[in-house]
Image: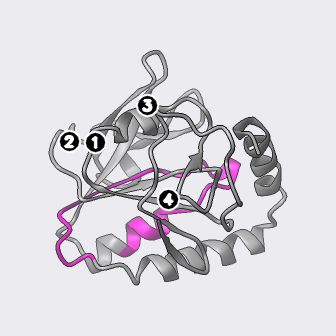
């Protein structure tokens, strides 16, 4: 299937998820997340959820990390829609977040992070069995990931689709994807 078709279908499917099902899926995602080995991790980059679009509730993951691994620095993105680039900021807590004009939560005072990141948790609408993902189509994460050696981990409330037909040379493959029922390695 083509990304445009996948994107439209994935958004429709997500919005059809009931509140109860959404909570169960996010609990499953957290259960899988907690099985990861964080012993040598110093910094994690993680996206903040657009809950209106039924993105995975990464606050559950962030709160679990803060409680169980307080020494790990949590980095969150801030998007510049004019350049289609992101800056990366230290997460200070929910009090430092404000929605931008696209309804995306962003840090306001968290210091800029230019250092290394060990794990990057990546938003997606769908992913295939080879580890390619479909995002919203702006390329923010593909540009961010192109020169990084960090492990790239997708977060999905849905299982893999068979194949994305129009993968381009700029698309960056995931190393893993976490779903509510499994951690898939590519």
Marks 3 and 1, Cα distance to the nearest angstrom? Answer: 11 Å
Q: How is the image coloured?
A: one colour
Q: How far across and how far down the image is residue 138, in percent? A: 55, 29
For the residues labelled 1 and 2, the Cα–Cα distance comes to 5 Å
Q: Are marks 1 and 2 in contact (CB under 8 Å)?
A: yes
Q: Is residue 156 left or right of residue 6?
A: left
The region drawn magenta spans: 38-64
Residue at image position (17%, 73%) is 40
User: Which comes before the other along the chain, label 1 or label 2?
Assistant: 1
Q: Secondary structure at mark 3?
A: strand
What residue did someone put label 4 on? 154
Determine the secondary structure under disc 2: loop
Of marks 3 and 4, which one's residue comes earlier in the chain? 3
Q: Which residue occupies 56% across, 62% down?
A: 57
Give the percent coordinates (x, y) of residue 108: 34, 36
What residue is at 21 percent from the left and 66 percent from the top?
Answer: 72
- Separation of marks 4 and 2 at Cα, in angstroms: 21 Å
Camera-side residue: 157 or 162? 162
Q: In the drawing, what numbered circle is on residue 79?
A: 3
| Relative to 24, residue 73 above or below | above
Q: Mark 2 sits on what residue?
A: 113
């Amino acid at each position: 299937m083509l990304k445009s078709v996948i994107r439209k279908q994935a958004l429709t499917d997500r919005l059809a998820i009931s509140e109860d099902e959404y909570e169960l899926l996010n609990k499953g995602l957290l259960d899988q997340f907690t099985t990861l080995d964080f012993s040598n991790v110093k910094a994690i980059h993680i996206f903040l959820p657009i809950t209106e679009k039924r993105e995975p509730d990464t606050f559950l993951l962030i709160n679990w990390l803060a409680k169980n691994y307080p020494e790990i620095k949590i980095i969150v993105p801030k998007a510049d829609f004019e350049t289609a680039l992101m800056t990366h900021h230290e997460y200070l807590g929910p009090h430092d977040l404000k929605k931008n004009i696209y309804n995306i939560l962003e840090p306001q005072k968290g210091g800029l992070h230019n250092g290394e990141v060990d794990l990057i948790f990546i938003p997606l609408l769908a992913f295939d069995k080879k580890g390619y993902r479909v995002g919203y189509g702006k390329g923010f994460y593909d540009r961010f990931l192109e020169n990084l050696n960090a492990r790239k981990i997708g977060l999905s409330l849905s299982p893999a689709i068979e194949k994305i037909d129009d993968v381009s040379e700029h698309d960056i493959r995931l190393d893993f994807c976490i779903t509510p029922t499994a951690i898939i390695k590519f």
